[in-house]
Image (cartoon, rainbow, N blue to C red):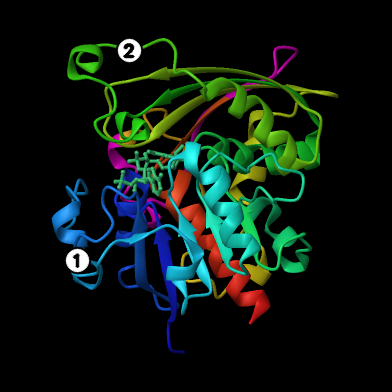
Amino acid sequence: MKPSKVGVLGATGAVGQMFCRMLEHHPWFEVAIVGASEASSGKRYRDAVTWRLESSMPSGVADLTIQSCVPEVFEGVDLVFSGLDSTVAHVKELAFAEAGFTVVSNASAHRMHPDVPLVVPEVNGDVLRSLSQPWSGQLVTNPNCVVIPLVMVLKPLVDVFGVGSVHVTSMQALSGAGYPGVSAMDSTGNILPFIPGEEPKIETEPLKILGRDLAIRSTAVRVPVRHGHLLSIHLGFEGATPSVNEVSQLLQTFETPSWMKGCPSALDKVLKVYDDPMQPQPRFVEQEGQGMAVHVGRIRGEGPLGISLMALGHNTIRGAVGCALLNAEVLALHQS
Ligand code: NAP
């Protein structure tokens, strides 16, 4: 299959750079147009961008000229990925959807819009198979980087055991704040006990994805780790608390839906469950499934106090760009 040409909005930013990196050798999509603010447009990508990722800048985008983020200049592509700053994503993403483009966004602007699906494909990706929206194009979003590992763990437990309450503390890596992010003076040898704007997203987005009215209390802190958000989760159940073994078995058998097989970025088993109490650790987060897996460990508890466990996801891969890419793959698979 010849790869289809796609665009990246906000291509110069932290998320945009990751889009360019993850699309570099993608078998279905090829980056043909990159867009950013007026301050960058007209410049060559390699000249405008300070490349912050560990791998080198993809040669396919390095010599592209950065364009303004307006639909007219993106003619020739059907799909755009958005890593736009949330303040501008609101207007610009709608303009693209109204102009007939498929917009696959990682920004928060439209996540809770009633006409916009908020999707983690392994959990609720079937909503993409029969999409009906008021625009001539389409607009699809993925959730916050903590919500992705959280709903992956919650989905089987909610369905089988009836989860009633969730307390989650997310220990969030520095790369989640973009670049330059948190100052070295604040982050070195320190933990910041509050991340503005994070907790409400973690308490509301899972309800839309799971279609359930769960009570979620979230605490979000910034820790001096490069990549990988570690979640300490405590679950209360509607009925009797299941055993540690039942929870572990259920999470181990959570499989990617069979209709997603064929998506290049999908793992057969997205949840990796550990018995070793020293796992999961952020420093190993890229070793399994190239950053697309969600790691679960320290399952413990039982009795009236419920079950506690830890989950870990790579925040800019599984928690952001990888999820958007998977959404685009599901759309391509079912709308071609
Ligand atoms: P960022 O580094 O500040 O990048 C923002 C991008 O938006 C840049 O390409 C910037 O272009 C472009 N932009 C800004 N104003 C614009 C305008 N008026 N018109 C067109 N383009 C404009 O931000 P980020 O960290 O990549 O985050 C991008 C989005 O993803 C945000 O909505 C954020 O909430 C979300 N997100 C981020 C992370 C993360 O880990 N960082 C995780 C999940 C979600 P210039 O370079 O030309 O200014």
Residue 38 location (% of width, % of height): 32, 50
Q: Which residues are magenta?
A: 283-308
Quadrant of the image for the C terminus? bottom right
Q: Which residue is identified by label 1?
A: 62
Vertical position of residue 78 compared to residue 281: above or below = below
**Relative depth, front residue between 72 and 287:** 72
> Could you say whether the residue bearing mark 1 is in a helix, strand or loop?
helix
Vertical position of residue 62 compared to residue 36: above or below = below
Q: Which residue is identified by label 2?
A: 191
Name the residue: 69% across, 39% down.
Answer: 112
Q: CA distance from mark 1 to mark 2?
A: 37 Å
Question: What is the residue that sits farthest to the right in this orientation?
Answer: 239
For discs 1 and 2, the disc positioned in front in the rendered view: 1
Name the residue: 43% across, 82% down.
Answer: 3
| Label 2 Cα neighbours within 10 Å, binned few <14 / some 14-19 / many ≥20 | some
Q: Quadrant of residue 280?
A: top left
